[in-house]
Image: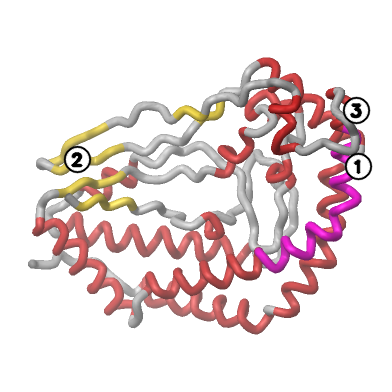
Amino acid sequence: MNRFSFSLLAVSVLALAACSGQADEDRSEPVLGLETGIVDLRIATLDARNDCVRLSGYPQMMHAQAMRPSEEHARRGMVYWNPLESGPMTTSYAEQYGLVGVVTAFEEPVPGDVISTDADFDRTIQACDEQLNTAIGEDVTAGFAEWTEFSDSVRDEFLGLAVVDAGDLIAEQESCFAKAVGLPADDVDFSSALEQLAITEGPTVTPDSTVAVYEGIEVVERPRSVYQPSEDEIEVARAFAQCSTEIDFVDRLEELQEPIRATVLETHGQEIGQFAQWSNTTREQLDGYTPTAVTT
């Protein structure tokens, strides 16, 4: 049995489009155009490959893609520290995610899985991948893998510098939060605050999946997980959000990121330019490609 899971944004660092309705909606990021362009390119290559598979008699990949949830999700950036990564920054986030459930905000909506026991289907997928790569002139999957490795490395470098400069800001947030919830100011740890307060962490629930069968091949929905905080956790999270507002955490975090971002981008400017050229060239090749049916 082969399970074809084809997340449109398979690695979190690729999920860097502008964040509609999330904490980073007003941010300005110099490399946003490149990041979103590569996201769009990844989607377009999957669309093209899946159209080839459809034309070859297997529509299941297209059906799986249609199962992708439409709701927005929070984004991380190559040179951007989303405040939501540090905790619920607003009352609405506190009520939705509690204190520790914000990680689910970054869970990307993904298409369904295609589960096949048909060897010809497997060969068709492979043949369509080969047709696409021939048209583009390279193994496009390898190109995305190189971008992911580079992006991850740059993000690690950026965050390593930003965390140092944010030390005083984080300490101020911790002090305010500790006072608000009655914890020792010198011994507060966000990751264990619920335990210290004897509050049970809420469950993370994944809704039941819809399973559809097309010509004997299953397509399984992959819904996003939902964190369910208790009322006690929400109350603590509201205190966290209130502290964030009082100390102006979001704006101060962005302000301290700006010079670090500029330095990191200057250091890696040549590599970023090379990836931009690769993205543009690959897009041009893809635009000239017309999928056709394959035989196996």
Q: Specify which label sits upstream in the sequence, 2 or 3.
A: 3
x, y (%) of residue 123?
Answer: 14, 64
- Is the residue 204 above or below the residue 61 in the image? above
Q: How crowded is mark 3: few (under 14 residues within 10 Å), some or many (20 or more)?
A: some
Which is nearer the eye, 171 or 12? 171
Closer to the N terminus: mark 1 or mark 3?
1
Q: Residue at x 70, y 27 (%)?
A: 194
Q: Left or right: where does residue 229 sit relative to residue 125?
A: right
Could you tell me what secondary structure mostly forms the magenta stretch?
Answer: helix
Whether residue 71 appears in magenta in the rendering, the answer is no
Dot label at residue 243: none
> Does 160 lie within the magenta span?
yes
- Name which quarter of the figure residue 127 lies in: bottom left
Q: Which residue is pictured at 85% across the width and 27% down the height?
A: 183
Expressed as whole percent of the image width and height from the top left, the position of residue 245 reads 86, 34
Q: Return the residue at label 3.
A: 179
- The part of the chain drawn in magenta is 156-176
Residue 112 horizontal side relative to residue 293, left or right: right
- Against 225, is 36 above or below? below
Q: Mark 1 points at which residue?
A: 172
Q: What residue type is labelled 3?
A: Lys
> Are the residues flagged by discs 2 and 1 in contact, CB closer than 8 Å?
no
Q: Looking at the picture, how far across and down is residue 25, in whole percent?
A: 70, 46
Residue receiving disc 2:
218
Instruction: Estimate how packed mark 1 is, as few (under 14), some (14 to 19) or many (20 or more) residues with alpha carbons within 10 Å.
Output: some
Considering the numbered disc 3 on the image, is that residue within a helix, a strand or a loop? helix
Real-space Cα separation, disc 2 to disc 1, in angstroms: 52 Å
Residue at the spot 71% in from the left edge and 47% down from the top edge: 24
Task: Give the mark nearer the N terminus: 2 vs 1.
Answer: 1
Q: In which quarter of the image is residue 257?
A: bottom right
**Camera-side mark, 2 or 3:** 3
